[in-house]
Amino acid sequence: MRQSITDLIKYTSSGLYCSVADVWIDPSKPVKRALITHAHMDHFTFGCDEYISTFETAIILKDRLGKEINIKTYDYNKEFKINGTKISFHPSGHILGSSQIKFNLAEEKWLITGDFKRQKDETCKEYEIVKTDFLISESTFGLPIFKWDEPQNTAIDITKWVSHSPKKVSILFCYSLGKAQRLLNEISKTNFKNNIHTHRSIFKVNNCYKKSGIDIVKTNKFDQTKNIADLKGSLLLLPPALHRSAFLKNLKDIQTGFASGWMSIRALRKRSGYDKGFSISDHADWDAILNTIKESQAKNVFFHHGDSEALNRYLKEKTSINVLEFGYTK
Ligand SMILES: [Zn+2]
Ligand SMILES: [Zn+2]
């Protein structure tokens, strides 16, 4: 079934690997040479000899891994060669610096989407449609039940949630990198006038964004040692890891919320332990995944990250696109 002459990208125990270029893509273990699609923790690891990414991703990676890492950067759309394989980064619309990676060998094109979204997000470059023969797509939200609302509606819901409880501190949990900055951007476009406080991990990422020329609304750095009661009527953004932390347990007069694509599922919302769930995602929903596959003109698709059974079935029944399983190499 597979019509590849190169079988360019395979799956290994360290992640996706291109043997011709001898590079790994977002490896999970330390390797010689790593192409990094973006700086979320599950897409890079400590200890690689060489990292290669976009300029913006490198700013965040250095912040997370240390300034001394050996990292080479390329602008979006700038082609470079490794062992004769042409490689380039293209915006994936997921977070600042996030990229799809295109490989071209012997006139055969392969594209790895990395994490991507198609919704508008002013804090990063918009997804670029790239044509390819073989597409490796993420499928985190690959079910028809996932259909995102406009982010501006979610932002308005959040501001109402805060404003309706002026005697409480409204604590919104969200990922420090990407989600927090997107929420701040969307909230800044509403007429929300209350104070906003951000955890230091978010505050730090905000500064990386500012360094890359992205305008982020001013927030106060949250100080855990101060009396949280002083923040009544404010919005406080914290990373999800702090949800069950000791300091929150003894607090009164707070309400908690979680901003995530998973919050679009009622059962998960109920089970989550948050007072409120706000559905907003930096990944593609069902329609966006299918449109992206179509626009890429790929004849062959692999899915990576997440459950892809429904997508496999849909593509098999409705299209002539082949859904392939990865070749595995050690
Ligand atoms: Zn990500
Ligand atoms: Zn991811």
Image (spheres, rainbow, N blue to C red):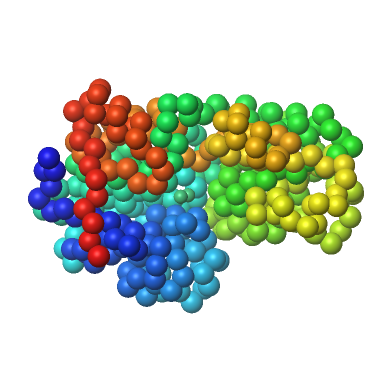
- The percent position of residue 267, horizontal first and vertical second, equals 60, 31
Q: Residue at x 41, y 43 (%)?
A: 306
Relative to 117, is 11 on the left or the right? left
Q: Residue at x 48, y 33 (%)?
A: 119
- Seen from the viewer's position, the closer of residues 35 and 257 is 257
- The percent position of residue 42, horizontal first and vertical second, equals 47, 57
Relative to 193, is 117 on the left or the right? left
- The percent position of residue 89, horizontal first and vertical second, equals 33, 52
Q: How many marks?
A: 0
Which quarter of the picture shows residue 50? bottom left
- Seen from the viewer's position, the closer of residues 132 and 215 is 132
- The percent position of residue 244, horizontal first and vertical second, equals 72, 52
Q: Work out which quarter of the rendered image holds the C terminus and state it.
A: bottom left
Q: Is residue 72 visible?
A: no
- Is 312 situated above or below 125? above
Q: Residue at x 55, y 66 (%)?
A: 63
- Is 321 situated above or below 244? above
Q: Residue at x 84, y 62 (%)?
A: 225
